[in-house]
């Protein structure tokens, strides 16, 4: 098996307390120079990433908003594969008294406001899903996970998950590790 694709989480993996060290940037530059394809997979919004570092120069795809926003720096293209958060969910979240951050396709709050979020989802017939990232609670369009966003990026780039190594530190990274199960084997794998 030839591993030449690295799918990397940001916070807690590449970054500590929101900062990527000089040594890590050097390692990423070296990895790219050696021919590895780098893909960033994060719960963060795209617009905050330039403040952290030059991801656009090194990564072939940036899966942001926990899979709900997929960006290809090379041609400056953003896709929202799972659409936007349902309007009835957004309205109820905004009406509830909780801190709320909005992305292009998702909303986020923090524990312990997840209890209210789960009530809202039950009232809207689960028009959205929830993923946790340590204390963060992300409310997503159905189908959006880091793993599904990653698979869409791989398909767009013409790469196979069979050649990928994924690294992450939290519960929302599990879908990255299992997305390999949803890929059909290549003719070579079938023997
Ligand atoms: Mg993380």
Image (cartoon, rainbow, N blue to C red):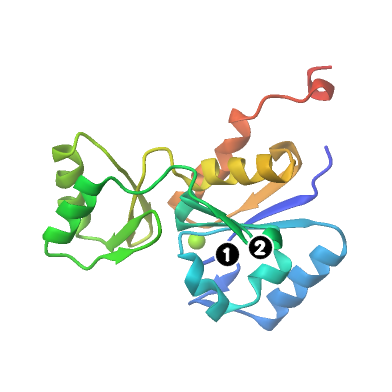
Q: Position of residue 77 (x, y in %)?
A: 60, 57
Residue 106: quarter of image: bottom left
SS at circle 1:
loop
Residue 101: quarter of image: bottom left
**CA gap, disc 1 to disc 2?**
21 Å
Drawn side of residue 90 relative to residue 132, left or right: left
Q: Residue at x 51, y 50 (%)?
A: 173
Q: Which residue is under mark 2?
A: 73
Drawn side of residue 71 relative to residue 86, left or right: right
Q: Which residue is under mark 1?
A: 13
37 in relation to 22, above or below: above
For label 2, the crowd category at 10 Å Cα-Cα, with few meaning under 14, some 14 to 19 and many 20 or more, is: some
For label 1, the crowd category at 10 Å Cα-Cα, with few meaning under 14, some 14 to 19 and many 20 or more, is: few
Drawn side of residue 30 relative to residue 72, left or right: right
Residue 183: numbered disc: none
Confirm or reject: label 1 Cβ below 8 Å from ligand 1. Answer: yes
Q: Position of residue 65 (x, y in %)?
A: 45, 57
30 in relation to 52, above or below: above
Q: Position of residue 85 (x, y in %)?
A: 32, 48
SS at circle 2:
helix
Q: Position of residue 156 (x, y in %)?
A: 67, 43
Residue 5 in view in this figure: yes
Q: Residue at x 60, y 30 (%)?
A: 181
Viewer-nearest of discs 1 and 2: 2
Report the number of discs: 2
Q: Residue furthest toward the top? A: 191
Q: Residue at x 76, y 41 (%)?
A: 163
Instruction: Give the position of the C terminus as an image quadrant.
Output: top right
- Along the line of sight, which residue is nearer the eye, 109 or 61? 61
Q: Residue furthest toward the right? A: 34
Earlier sequence position, callout 1 versus callout 2: 1
């Amino acid at each position: 098996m030839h591993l030449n694709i690295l799918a990397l989480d940001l916070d807690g993996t590449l970054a500590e307390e929101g900062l990527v060290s000089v040594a890590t940037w050097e390692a990423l530059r070296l990895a790219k120079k050696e021919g590895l394809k780098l893909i960033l997979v994060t719960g963060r919004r795209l617009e905050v990433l330039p403040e952290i570092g030059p991801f656009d120069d090194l990564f072939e795809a940036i899966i942001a908003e926990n899979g709900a926003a997929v960006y290809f720096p090379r041609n400056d293209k953003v896709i929202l594969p799972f659409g936007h958060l349902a309007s009835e969910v957004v309205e109820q979240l905004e009406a509830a008294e909780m801190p709320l951050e909005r992305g292009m396709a998702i909303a986020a709050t923090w524990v312990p406001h997840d209890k209210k979020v789960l009530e809202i989802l039950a009232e809207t017939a689960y028009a959205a899903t929830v993923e946790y990232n340590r204390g963060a609670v992300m409310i997503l369009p159905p189908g959006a996970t880091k793993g599904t966003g990653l698979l869409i990026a791989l398909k767009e780039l013409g790469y196979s998950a069979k050649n990928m190594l994924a690294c992450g530190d939290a519960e929302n990274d599990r879908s990255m590790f299992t997305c390999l199960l949803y890929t059909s084997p290549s003719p070579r794998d079938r023997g």
